[in-house]
Image: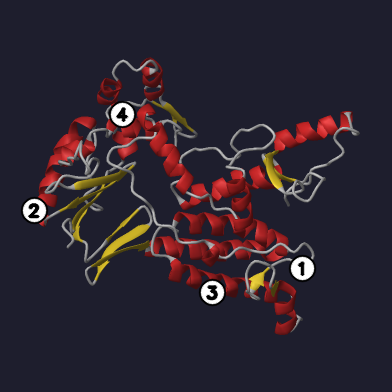
C-alpha cells in the first residue's frame, strides 16, 4: 500500500539570479578558494549594448561553477523539509516512517508526503528556510498534487495508474524529440545516407539511454515508427523520380546482421546503419542509498561496485570485449572508459556518445587490435588509441620484432 501519495512539485524562481552572496560565502566557511569565489561573485557582467553591470546577488546562469554554488546554497534542504533517515541497522539509509522524502536536482524540487496537509506544512517550512538565502518558490509552477494526477520532473512523468505507480517520459519530452528529429531531417535533405546516420545516431542513443530506466518500451517502438516515416519521406524527396520499391531497396534492409529486421535504414556502400530506439534495453534504475555521496572517500567501494552494474550504451559486441578485458587496456592496464558519474540528461548522453564514444571507440581512445599468431591468441581487443599509436611507432622502428599492425574500429 503506497504511503507517500501527495507531492509538493516545487520550482525556485530565478534561483541562479537571486542567491544571497553573504549567505553563500558563510556556507563555504573556511574553504581554501573562498576569496576566489567571492571575486567571481562580485566581478560583475558586461553585456553588449548595455555596458557593465555590478552583481550584488546571484551567480552567472550557465557558468561552470554555478550549479556547484547552488548546491552549496541549498545544502540542508532535506533536513529543513523534515526528511529523516535510519542511521543504523538493516534499514540504514531508508527514510523513517511518517517523514517526507525530498528529491532535488538544481532548482527543481519534489517532496513526497503522506497527506496534503503535510505537503502544505513542508511548503511553508521550506519557504521560510529559503528566504535568508535570497530564494523563493515560483508560485506559478509550484503546486501540491496527488499521485493519481501525476507531475513532471526532469523530463519524466510520475503518476499512479489504477493504484500502480508508473514513471514514463513526459509528453513535453516526447514532443521535443519528435520536433528535433523532424527538424534534423529537413536540414539533411541535401545530404546522403551517411550524413543522416552520423547526425541522428547520437541523438537516438542519447535520448533512449536517458529514458531506458523507466516505462519506455512501447514508446521506443512508437518513435521508431515515426522516425521510419521521416526517413522514407527523406528518401522519396531525394529520389523523386524513383518508384517506392526502388527507394526501399536502396535505403532499407538487414543492415544489422545481429537483428532479424529488414527495415533498418542504412548506407549500401559502407554497410553502416542507423540505430533504433527499441534497440536500447530497458534497465531499471537502482536508487542511491540514503545520503551516499560520490565525493565521500569512505564510500569509494560502494560507488565503484555501483558503476560496474551500469553498462554504457555500447553495442553488445563492444560490451563483450570490455567485459572480457575487465574494462582495461591490455597494453597499459588503465581503464578504457572513465568512471565518471553517468550523464543526467538526454543532451549530456548525446554529447557522451558523440564526443566520448565516437572519439574513444572509433577514433581517439579505443581501437580494435588484432595480433597474428595461434588461433587462441589471434583475437580482437580494445586498446587506447594513444597506446595504439605508441605500438605503431615501435613497429615502424623495429618491424622485425613487431610485424603486426593494429586495425581501428570503424
> Which quarter of the figure is the N terminus placed in?
bottom left
Dots 3 and 4: beta carbons under 8 Å?
no
Q: In which quarter of the image is residue 92?
A: top left
Q: Position of residue 124 (x, y in %)?
A: 12, 44
**What is the distance, in whole Å, between disc 1 and disc 3 at their CAs?**
22 Å
Horizontal arrangement in the rendering, residue 209 relative to residue 214 (left or right): right
Residue 28's label in the rendered image is none
Residue 29 or residue 191, whichever sits in front: 29
Residue 268's label in the rendered image is 1
Residue 407 or residue 122, whichever sits in front: 407
**What is the distance, in whole Å, between disc 2 and disc 3 at their CAs?**
45 Å
Tag 3 or tag 2, which sits nearer the N-term?
Answer: 2
Q: Where is residue 88 in the image (x, y as percent from the top left)?
A: 20, 36
Relative to 247, does residue 46 appear above or below in the rendering?
above
Q: Can residue 379 be seen in this view?
A: yes
Residue 378 or residue 48, whichever sits in front: 378
Q: In percent of the image, x 64 and y 43: which residue is there?
A: 360
Residue 225's label in the rendered image is 3
Horizontal arrangement in the rendering, residue 340 relative to residue 382 (left or right): left
Tag 4 or tag 3, which sits nearer the N-term?
Answer: 4
Badge 2 marks a residue whose secondary structure is helix
- Residue at image mark 2: 117
Pointer 4 local density, CA inside 10 Å: few below 14, some 14–19, many at least 20 = some
Badge 3 marks a residue whose secondary structure is helix
Relative to 203, does residue 37 appear above or below in the rendering?
above
Tag 3 or tag 1, which sits nearer the N-term?
Answer: 3
Amino acid at each position: 500500500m503506497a504511503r507517500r501519495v501527495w507531492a509538493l512539485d516545487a520550482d525556485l524562481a530565478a534561483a541562479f539570479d537571486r542567491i544571497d552572496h553573504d549567505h553563500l560565502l558563510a556556507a563555504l566557511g573556511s574553504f581554501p578558494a573562498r576569496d576566489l569565489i567571492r571575486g567571481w561573485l562580485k566581478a560583475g557582467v558586461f553585456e553588449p549594448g548595455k555596458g557593465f553591470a555590478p552583481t550584488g546577488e546571484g551567480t552567472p546562469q550557465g557558468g561552470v561553477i554555478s550549479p556547484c554554488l547552488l548546491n552549496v546554497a541549498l545544502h540542508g534542504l532535506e533536513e529543513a523539509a523534515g526528511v529523516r533517515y535510519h542511521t543504523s541497522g538493516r534499514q540504514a539509509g531508508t527514510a523513517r516512517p511518517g517523514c517526507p522524502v525530498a528529491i532535488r536536482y538544481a532548482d527543481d524540487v519534489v517532496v513526497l508526503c503522506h497527506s496534503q496537509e503535510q505537503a502544505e506544512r513542508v511548503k511553508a517550512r521550506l519557504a521560510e528556510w529559503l528566504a535568508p538565502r535570497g530564494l523563493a518558490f515560483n508560485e506559478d509552477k509550484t503546486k501540491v498534487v496527488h499521485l493519481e494526477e501525476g507531475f513532471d520532473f526532469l523530463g519524466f512523468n510520475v503518476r499512479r495508474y489504477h493504484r500502480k505507480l508508473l514513471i514514463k517520459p513526459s509528453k513535453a519530452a516526447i514532443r521535443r524529440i519528435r520536433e528535433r528529429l523532424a527538424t534534423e531531417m529537413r536540414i539533411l535533405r541535401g545530404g546522403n545516407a551517411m550524413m543522416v546516420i552520423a547526425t541522428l545516431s547520437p541523438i537516438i542513443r542519447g535520448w533512449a539511454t536517458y529514458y531506458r530506466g523507466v516505462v519506455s518500451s512501447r514508446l521506443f517502438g512508437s518513435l521508431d515508427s515515426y522516425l521510419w516515416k521521416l526517413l522514407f519521406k527523406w528518401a522519396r524527396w531525394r529520389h523523386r523520380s524513383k518508384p517506392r520499391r526502388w527507394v526501399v531497396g536502396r535505403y532499407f534492409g538487414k543492415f544489422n546482421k545481429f537483428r532479424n529486421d529488414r527495415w533498418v535504414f542504412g548506407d549500401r556502400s559502407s554497410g553502416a546503419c542507423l540505430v533504433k530506439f527499441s534497440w536500447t534495453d530497458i534497465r531499471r534504475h537502482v536508487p542511491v542509498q540514503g545520503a551516499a555521496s560520490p565525493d565521500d572517500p569512505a564510500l569509494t567501494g560502494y560507488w565503484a561496485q555501483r558503476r560496474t552494474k551500469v553498462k554504457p550504451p555500447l553495442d553488445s559486441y563492444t560490451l563483450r570485449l570490455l567485459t572480457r578485458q575487465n574494462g582495461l587496456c591490455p597494453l597499459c592496464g588503465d581503464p578504457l572508459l572513465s568512471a565518471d558519474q553517468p550523464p543526467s540528461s538526454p543532451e549530456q548522453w548525446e554529447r557522451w556518445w558523440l564526443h566520448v564514444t565516437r572519439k574513444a571507440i572509433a577514433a581517439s581512445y579505443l581501437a580494435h587490435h588484432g595480433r597474428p599468431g595461434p588461433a587462441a591468441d589471434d583475437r580482437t581487443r580494445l586498446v587506447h588509441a594513444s597506446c595504439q599509436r605508441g605500438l605503431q611507432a615501435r613497429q615502424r622502428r623495429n618491424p622485425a620484432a613487431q610485424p603486426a599492425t593494429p586495425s581501428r574500429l570503424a
